[in-house]
Image (tube, rainbow, N blue to C red):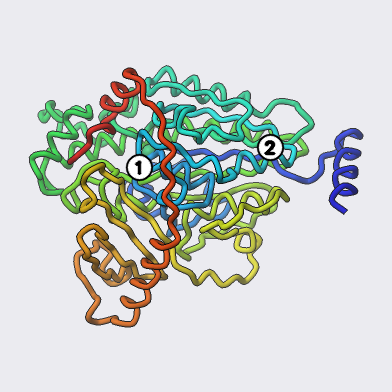
Amino acid sequence: MRVLAWILLACCAACGRTDGRPNVLVLVADSLAAGHVSSHGYERPTTPNFDAFAAAGVRFSNAGAAAAWTLPSVASLFTSQPQEAHGARDDELRLSGELPTLAERLRNAGFETHAVVQTPVLGRRTGVDRGFERYDVLDFSLASFERALELARSAFGSSSAPRFVYVHVAPPHMPYQPPAPYRGRFSAESESLAHVDGSIESARAVHRARLAPDHPDVVRLRALYDEHITFVDARLGELVRSLQAQANERPLLIVWTSDHGEAFMEHGEQGHNSSVYEEMLHVPLAIAGTGLRARVEPAPVSLLDVAPTLLELCDAPALPRAEGRSLAPLLRAESFDLQRTLVASSRHYEGKPERWQVAVRSGRFKLHAWPGLGRAELRDLDADPDERADCSAEHPDVRAHLQRELERLQAAFVASTERRELSESERRTLRELGYADDGR
Ligand SMILES: [Zn+2]
């Protein structure tokens, strides 16, 4: 039957009609926290373009990254496995070669695959390039951001085969340096605090001083980040609209999201990497394309669900042992029971197992665990969205259930340790981006 299906597909392509499978774009804006997105209720008008895009499709208001920093989060996006299982949980560890990826599956199903990543954190030696026929790695500069947009614009050529394109842009990742006319939009009143200039050093200074979230330096840093968001939102909006206008008879499916959030001292941290509080995990996620009915979906979902969803929508074989689930029935507005637990974790700091944090979520409840310390607290995200209180005593059954889930997940983690060598220039770049020796 499968052979017959392929013959039919080939005939359709030959006679100029498409096979119904979409072109797919996965668009990731690095470090875009959902809490700073207007359609998520943020008070500043940071994201009119994301909001308009999402309003025409399905916006997931409760989407979480699987990890609090770039490499493991993207590896999870492609494999539907948590970082403890896929192995790419450190700069010097590779994605396990045993796990098939979204790009591999789509390429094997006849898609042409192309990635444009504007961050050396996702360089080829990480293994996340597996399955991409073309994989462009660009640096963090503004010129490279423009180049990434250009490459994305030309990635959907006139080929008769469907395409899978992954575009990962650096902004609004720090340094928060929005160009004109975005610079000053929210930060003009604090011009006198010129020492907070959005550079990585100024962000680290805020962190080191353990400033409160309402300290003027933190307020200014947040305003610069918001301006940076407004900049990337505008440019990605232009990209999306031009691709949608170019779309031919093959439908274009676009996933617009981020790899993790960004903290501004809500729980004593600035930036990302180090915790599983919502400011570091909660990301915007919207999927739009032909045939999707516009709606907002409040059920908790994970970036682990993206690969299973796309594979189903593209009629490609599923990933084995996926931790995520296909959201395709939700996109089709079919009734669908999404009761399950979701896992996410922070960075693994070598030699500091006590700093590793894991979140296990079910509905409104989230177990926030520090496995290296043997400690965990239960949060009720509806009653306590700022995650201040441990409600284990009020909900002992939930606590016990999530604790068992944590133990199940830990037992299922197959630690992969495929190492890679970092070059001196990679080490330097990672340090400049605030990644390496981030022992804070
Ligand atoms: Zn990132």
Residue to which mark 1 is pinned: 69
Pick the quarter of the image with the C terminus: top left
Viewer-closest of 163 and 273:
273
Q: Is residue 10 above or below residue 274?
A: above
Per the image, the residue denoted by label 2 is 107
Give percent across and percent down for residue 241.
58, 35
The quadrant of the picture showing ligand 1 is top left
Q: Residue at x 22, y 51 (%)?
A: 355
On screen, residue 223 versus residue 22, left or right, reads left
Looking at the rendered structure, the kind of residue marked 2 is Arg
Give the left or right position of residue 368, taking residue 303 as reference: left
Compared with 33, 164 (above or below) is above
At horizontal 41% and vertical 59% (from top left) the residue drawn is 343
Q: Position of residue 317 (x, y in %)?
A: 69, 51
Give coordinates of residue 338: x percent, y percent. Answer: 53, 69
- In contact (CB < 8 Å): disc 1 and disc 2: no
Ligand 1 lies under 8 Å from the Cβ of mark 2: no
Ligand 1 within 8 Å, label 1 CB: yes
What kind of residue is marked 1?
Trp
Residue 157 placement, left or right of 187: right
Res 316 label? none
